[in-house]
Amino acid sequence: MPDVHFSDAELEQRRDHITDFIRSQVDAAGADGAVLGLSGGIDSTLTAYLLVDALGVENVHGLVLPGTVSSDENMSDAERVAQDLEISYDVIELEPVIDSLLAAYPDAEGDHMAVGNARARVRAVLNYLVANHENRLVIGTGNRSEAAVGYFTKYGDGAVDCHPIGNLYKAQVRQLARHMDVPEDLVSKTATAELWADQTDEDELGISYETLDSILVTHIDGPLSVAATCRLLEVDEATVEKVRGMYERSEHKRQVPPAPEPLH
């Protein structure tokens, strides 16, 4: 499979590029720092490390936002990241807000997709509540692989002021995390958005991150045809077409909501 990894020199260059980006975004907004949600996963963990690198410990505020479907391990890891980095953080329970939403609209009870997306959107509301109160930016934790196939909740984890790791494929996220001395158990743990019980990212996507990254690099972001991609990666055409379909169907998530063209 094609190598999406950076050299050691490229890793340091990318780290500097991202931390410069973070500082420029905060400075341009006249903000006093950053707020991010900490899930215990590698994307939010690497983003937290980069924020501390860019802004200093005192200018980063973490939010741990557990719900009933959140595992104790992930929430413990989220707090561990905040404690290891010595950033301020709060733990805010999601479920009272979700219960209020379902009391207002009980027809959605049991709809794991609708309620799962509501959890992501409530997290975004809480992120902005804290960020507005403290004059901080809300920092996204989305990566390039997930953005390309729409694997995020519109106005949920996609509702942020900037995405520092948004140009990194998932393999590159893990590689940069190792470069920045993130603990290996966090780097290599199974990815989950924890929108419903026992959910994992790769199960929901129906494809491994390794295969997804390779198809994105060669076919979606790269020049190869479907047939050439299949030959190079030794994957079947249905897998490549699946990724192509996810990319095309999720285009609306990566754009500003459209409006009609003005009448002349």
Image (spheres, grey):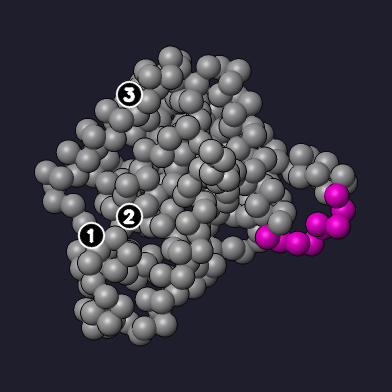
Q: Amino acid at mark 2?
A: Tyr
> Element type at marker 1?
loop
Q: Which residues are magenta?
A: 105-113
Mark 3 sits on what residue? 24
Which residue: 67% across, 47% down?
Answer: 119
Which residue: 36% across, 38% down?
Answer: 164
Residue sitting nearer the eye, 72 or 218: 218
Locate residue 144, reporting x and y percent.
37, 52
Dot 1 crowding, Cα within 10 Å, few <14, some 14–19, many 20+: some
Locate residue 170, reporting x and y percent.
35, 56
Q: Quadrant of the N terminus?
A: bottom left
Q: Is residue 163 above or below residue 71?
A: above
Alpha carbon separation for disc pair 3 and 2? 22 Å
> Element type at marker 2?
loop
Q: Which mark is residue 4?
A: 1
Q: Find out whether the residues at labels 1 and 2 contact each other: C-beta distance under 8 Å.
A: yes
Q: Amino acid at mark 3?
A: Ser
Residue sitting nearer the eye, 260 or 87: 260
Q: Mark 3 or mark 1, which is nearer to you?
A: 3
Residue 23 lies in the magenta stretch: no
Q: Report the side of 217 relative to 202 (left or right).
A: left
Mark 2 sits on what residue? 169
Dot 2 crowding, Cα within 10 Å, few <14, some 14–19, many 20+: many
Q: Of the two numbered discs 1 and 2 on the same chain, state the one appearing first in sequence.
A: 1
Q: Report the side of 172 relative to 64 (left or right).
A: left
Which residue: 23% across, 83% down?
Answer: 231
Residue sitting nearer the eye, 262 or 72: 262
Residue 109 lies in the magenta stretch: yes
> Element type at marker 3?
helix
Q: Mark 3 or mark 2, which is nearer to you?
A: 3
Q: Report the side of 44 relative to 89 (left or right).
A: left
Locate residue 36, reporting x and y percent.
50, 33
